[in-house]
Amino acid sequence: MFLSLSLTLLTTTALPLEKDIGTFLRKPDKVESFEVESDGFSKFAILPKSQPVSAPVASELAKIFLDPATFDDYIKGCGFSPAVAFRFTKGDKAIDVLVSFQCRELQIQPAGSNDWRVGKKSFDRLAPRILALTKTARPDDVRLKDFK
């Protein structure tokens, strides 16, 4: 399973993240969304201003992110350029799930890092649902209107 890998990750404070990412996503203390600025060629920055994500939306996103049927068996050759990051925080640890609607890929990494080795997957099959949930979480984000 994509996200239930047993991994030890480091946050920006060098504290180990929970080994079971699935449990982490299912039981966060809070979930926030962030705008991501990207150059379109795999370089990006998560902007500091966050918006809280409601518990129902966070739960639905976690279910989608944890379901192996969500993902394709390949990574695309486009430059990963995320528009949004969802930060799942538990205690003093966090992971970021960066979402690129241009490439229809997501990347999971320890919060504050650019270490995508935790996971990067294509999500063509559920792109409309992920986009709808993202628009619900970020209703004033005009950048999302052009994605389908």
Image: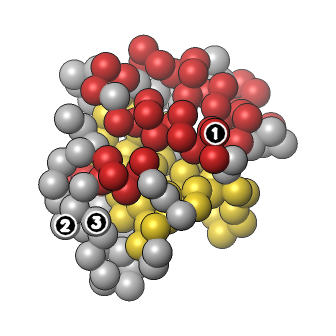
* Residue type beneath disc 1: Pro
Is 64 situated above or below 87?
A: above
Q: Would you place residue 117 above or below residue 112 in this image?
A: above
- Three-letter amino acid code of the residue under disc 3: Glu
Residue in the picture at 37% in, 56% down = 24
Q: Secondary structure at mark 3?
A: loop
* Residue 1 on image: x %, y %: 20, 35
Towards the viewer: 41 or 143: 143
Query: Which residue reaches farthest bottom?
Result: 13
On the question of residue 45 being in view, the answer is no
Ranked by sequence position, the earlier of labels 2 and 1 is: 2
Q: Position of residue 90 (x, y in %)?
A: 46, 67
Q: Are marks 3 and 2 in contact (CB under 8 Å)?
A: no
What residue sits 66% from the left and 69% below the top?
Answer: 48
Task: Say whether residue 117 is left or right of residue 132.
Answer: left
Name the disc covering residue 56, or none: 1
Location of residue 51 (image quadrant): bottom right
**First in residue order: circle 3 vs circle 2:** 2
Q: What crowding class fits label 2: few (fewer than 14 Cα within 10 Å), some (14-19), or many (20 or more)?
A: some
The CA distance from mark 3 to mark 1 is 23 Å
Q: Determine crowd level at label 1: few under 14, some 14-19, many 20+ residues with C-alpha closer than 10 A.
A: few
- Residue 90 visible: yes
Secondary structure under tag 2 reads loop
In the foreground, 129 or 90: 90
Report the front residue among 4 and 96.
4
Q: Tell me the tag on residue 8.
A: 2
The 10 Å Cα crowd at callout 3, few under 14, some 14 to 19, many 20 or more, is some
**Looking at the rendered structure, which numbered label has been put on residue 21?**
none
Q: Is residue 52 found left or right of 73 in the rendered image?
A: right
Q: Which residue is mark 3?
A: 18
Q: Amino acid at mark 2?
A: Thr
